[in-house]
Each structure stands twice: as structure tokens, then as C-alpha cells.
Amino acid sequence: MADGSLVAVPNTLIGGRFAVDTSQVLPDAGGGLPAYLARDRSAGDGRRVALVVSRDASPRARHLKMLDQPIDYLMAPLGHGVAPNPGGKGEGYFVICTPPPGPPVSAGLNTWPEKALIDLVLRPIAGVLDILHTRRLTHRAIRPNNVFQAAPGQPVTLGGAWAAPPAMHQPAVFESPYSAMCLPACRGDGSIGDDVYALGVLLLTLSGGKIPMPNMDDATRVRWKLDLGSFAALTRDFSLSGALPDLLRLMLAEDPEHRPLPSQLMDLATTRGRRVAARPARRSQNSLMLQDIAIFDANTLAYGLFRDEKKAIQFLRNGLVTQWLRRGLGDAGSATQIEELVRGRVAETKSGPWSDSFLVMRTIDALNFRMPLCWRGIAIWPDALPAMLADGIASKAELLAAVEELIAADVFAYWSQEDVRSGRPDPPDLASQRQILHAGGPAGLLRLFYTLNPQLPCRSPRMVASWVATMPDLMRFFENAGERDEDSLIDLHISAFIAARADRKIEVQVNALSGAKDAESYRGAELALLQEMQARYHPTPMPALAKWVAARLQPDLRRWRNKPRREAMQVRLDQLTQAGSLARLLELVEDRASWVLDSAGAQLAVNEVAGIDAEVAAIDHHGEARFADAERFGRAIAGGIGLSVFILMMMSILL
């Protein structure tokens, strides 16, 4: 396709540089995500790939910021931003990456020889992971459909992992059991050891030409890995030889600290000398049945308690767990620790709504310190909280409820896994998030969602076709939305969005808006908020929005009593509407000095009318007396006039 065939309006270019051609679908380039052709207008060979970001799953902001230059054997992110959706149906968000060299290795899974695995797969990907590790980043999307090869004999290229949360689209078989047991949105960035694990599963897949552990559901895969160990569970149907078994045993170690670093994988001479010094898990001769699962060790017991909280509470209260630990497994230390937890729960004088959940969580932690945080049937790593919240807002009410409980009950403070969390990114500032949740009223969770996912758009029903992620975006949306018949522009989603993305002064005004007690005060607070938002985020004329505001100011204008002034103000209001300044519109109708004069003039007119009315009333009250006096005076005057006429007539006769 020639460059000239891709037409792009300048304001649709991402970063002023990349044009997305949504008519050119690249079905295999996104590693499972939708992908389109893009072109770099500043490069000679401008062919790029545009990965689609879902409105419900945040892209990886740190990676987009820190990986903005090409990296060998990696589809690095070169830019990101808003562009038209396919068919011109609204706006979407795209991550622009370097293109893959060829199809994914999943297109035809063949058996690879060991030398090809080492030279063409292990070393190139380990080099990429080493670069990421030095920048304290992870990839978390190493899987066959996201690894690409130009031709046989060529090194592979690792696909993009930036347009979705970490491990969101990762098959459970490529994740360690402690990540695979989490929902896809709850896995978090993890550590570089998680990428080494996924790379080990990829090597195993290519060595045998098939995906390990087929025809199993994810829960069964996790249970087998916990019961047998990852290496034994994954390699059951594989015949390995040479140096590959020892290498994979290291890469698939249960403890992330025992897995080699990417730099060590690049030098296999040092890696071959390493041995995993992990003690095998203690196993019982007699099983404990929990949820139709035969449990033989503490790791599987912890997983079973996580999978069925109701049964877990029952077994903890009646002592079956501690009895089996002490007698069946011979682990008196863990049994004593759990007995103390149960006694503490029983001794509580006031049972909170989450007391039993805390007991199960702490018991699981005591049995297997590598487990993620397990809360009421949901496993989560704390750094995955933003993605978990976004997934809950989109479609999963149970996740929303879990997020609210985790923050409100300060669960993270009671779950300490410092050894396991080494190498993982820190979770969000939970103290500030708890403050947002408690102070946010009915929009608390929405405010938290918009705070923790700064690149996701506002989810207001009015914006389903627009990607509004910043305050300037919101103001442009208000201006470009055309004619509006709504009584209010700011709904619950928009108010939460503004409170999360704007500065402190605007947030105070949003709180005032939510505290309005009647329609009149709400209207005033909304107009004041829009005025402040224009001043801060869009200080240019907004005639369309001004027209909507002017219509809402008509009741204020009609309150002016001086008709000539009111008519003059209407003319001025129309002029200012065309100028598009909300502040000047509000100043016009809220001119306090002129309003005082108008009120005083209206009061003077009222007083004058009252005086006239009083005189008319007085006339009406004394009407009969005045009529009698008038009649008497009239008769007297008539008699006098008649006498005068008579005298004049007599004098005329005499003369």
C-alpha cells in the first residue's frame, strides 16, 4: 500500500506523527488484541502497528512513558493517543508499536531443536527482559501468539504488551500458579521472575510443538502445579533431553527468587552450574477432602481454603484443619499458629462483617506465604488494584464489592508479604484512596476508578463514541456535542471524572455541586463550575456551550424589573453568547450593583403605585358624603345663578 493511499487529517494524527488506517486489519499482529496498520509520517519506512486499547482495560502508563524508542527484538511502543475508530464510529485509543517481522510462532507449532531454542528464542527474549529489568519493568505477555519470527533460522521478536493490563490476556498455563489463580485483571505487573517463568513455558511449548497441560480447566492446572510443582506438572507429556530439563527446572522454580535473572539466561555457562535448593513440600499419607479435592500438602490446602470460603470457615472452627496439620502432615508449628488465629476470632466480643474473611485470609497466608491476597473467593496482587477496579466498573459487580471492602476494611495493612513482593511494583497509596472512597459519597468508587486509571475515558452514557480522558478533552466534548436539550450537562460519571482529573479548587466545586439541595442551587453550582473549567482548561471562545448556558440564564434575566434594561441585557446576552465566554455571561446576569439599582427602582415604583391605590381607595371609601356635599353646593350655586338671572331680567324690564 503506497503512502499516498493513507489519507490522514492532521488533527487525527497521534502525536502529530502516526496515522492509523482502520481499513487495514492486522489480525495476527496484536498477540490477541485488535491491531491495525499505522504509518509514521516522519520516517521513510513508516509502516507501524496500532494496538487497540479497550475502554474497560487501562494501558500500561509506565511502559508507554519509559519505552518510547526502538528496542531490538521487541515491538516497542513509539506513541499512543486518540484516533478515529473503524468506520468513523467515534474515537478510540491506540498504542503505536514497531511492526512484527513475520507471523507469530503459534501460526504453526513445530518441534524446535534445542540449539534453535537457545539461540533464536531464549537469548533474544532474555536480552529484551534484561533491558526491561534494568528499568524496573516487566513484559507479562510472553505467549506463542505474541512472539513473532520473520523466517526459520531468524531470531524471534517479542510482541507488544502495552495496550492492556499486565497478564490480562495471558493463558493460565503460562503463569505461575500464584498468578494463574487470580482473575486476569488481578494479576498485576509481577516481577521479572514471572516473565522468566512464561519464557520457560514458551521454550517447553516450542520444544514439543504443543501447549502443555491440554484439555484442562484453569483451576485444575493451578491445582496440579501446586500439588506436583510447576516443572513436573508442565513436563508430564514431554520428552526432554540435553540441557533443556535443567534449564527449565530453574526457570519454572516455585520461588521467583530461585529463577535465573535475564542476564544469567544470556550466559548459560553460569546458569548450568546453578541448582535449586528448595526443600520439597511435606506431604501427608492421609488426604483431607475439601470441595471434592484430595489435599496432601499445605500448599494445596491453602488453595482449597481459598476456593471455598464457607467450607474453610467450617473446617477452621471445628478444628479439622489444625488436626490434619498436626496429625496428618506433622506440621505442629502451622497448626499452633492457626489455632491462635481461630481463638482470636472466637474471642472477639464484636464480630465485624469481615471477621471470618480475615480469618481465612490469615490462615491461607500462614499455610503458604507465596499465595496472593485471598479475600472472599478473589485472589489479587495489590498492584493490580487499578485494573481490578476498571474490570469491576465495566461488568463485574463482585469485583467492585471486593475493592470497596479491601479499602474500607484496610485489608492490605493486615496482609504482609514483603519477601514475596520483592521486585513487584508498590501498590497505590491506599491511605489516600481510602480517603477518596469515604469522602466521595455515591460516586466514591467512580472517583477512585478515574484516579487510578488516568488514561481511561469518562464512562458517561453521553460519551460512548468519544474518548474523553483529560479535562481539555471534556471541554472540547461539551463544545462539539451540538445542540443539547438536557437540563444538566454534568451527570454522576462526569462529576466523578472532574473530581478525579481536575485540580483541588475544581474538586471543591464538584463537592458543592453534589451537595446542592434543590434544582435552583444545583443550576447555579453547575454554571459556576463550567465557568471555572473554561477558565482553567479551555480559555478560548466556546459559543456552543455558551448558548446552552445562556438558555439556563433566562430565568435570572426575567427577574430584572426594568423593562428597557431587561431588553438591553437580552441583546447583550446574545452578543456575549456569540463571543463564547461563560464568565462574562454570568457576570452580566449577576451584576450586583445594577441588581441593587433595579431592585431599588422596582421598590420605588411599588411604593408609588401603593400611594395611588391608597388615594383611590380613600375616594371610594368617602364617596357618599362627598356626593351629598356636591349636591348641596350644586343646589346653592344653581339657586344663586337663578336669582341672579331673575334680578337681571327685572332690571331689564324696569329700564
Image (tube, helix red, strand yellow):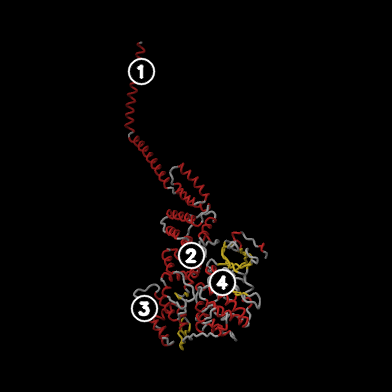
Ranked by sequence position, the earlier of labels 2 and 3 is 3
> Which disc, if any, is residue 645?
1
Count residues near mark 2 (Cα–Cα under 10 Å), then give few for <14, some for 14-19, many for 20+. many
Q: Which residue is labeled 4 in the image?
A: 161
Give, as a three-letter code, the residue at label 4.
Answer: Ala
Count residues near mark 3 (Cα–Cα under 10 Å), then give few for <14, some for 14-19, many for 20+. few
**Secondary structure type for disc 1:** helix
- Say whether marks 2 and 1 touch (CB < 8 Å): no
> Which disc, if any, is residue 450?
2
Q: Position of residue 204 (x, y in %)?
A: 58, 81
**Secondary structure type for disc 4:** loop
Nearest to the eye among marks 4 and 2: give it. Answer: 4
- Say whether marks 1 and 4 touch (CB < 8 Å): no
Ranked by sequence position, the earlier of labels 2 and 1 is 2
Q: Is residue 368 left or right of residue 202?
A: left
Count residues near mark 1 (Cα–Cα under 10 Å), then give few for <14, some for 14-19, many for 20+. few
Ranked by sequence position, the earlier of labels 3 and 1 is 3
**Secondary structure type for disc 3:** helix
- Say whether marks 2 and 3 touch (CB < 8 Å): no
Residue 453 appearing in the image: yes
> Which disc, if any, is residue 553?
none
- Say whether marks 3 and 4 touch (CB < 8 Å): no
Q: Position of residue 140 (x, y in %)?
A: 54, 74
Give, as a three-letter code, the residue at label 3.
Answer: Gly
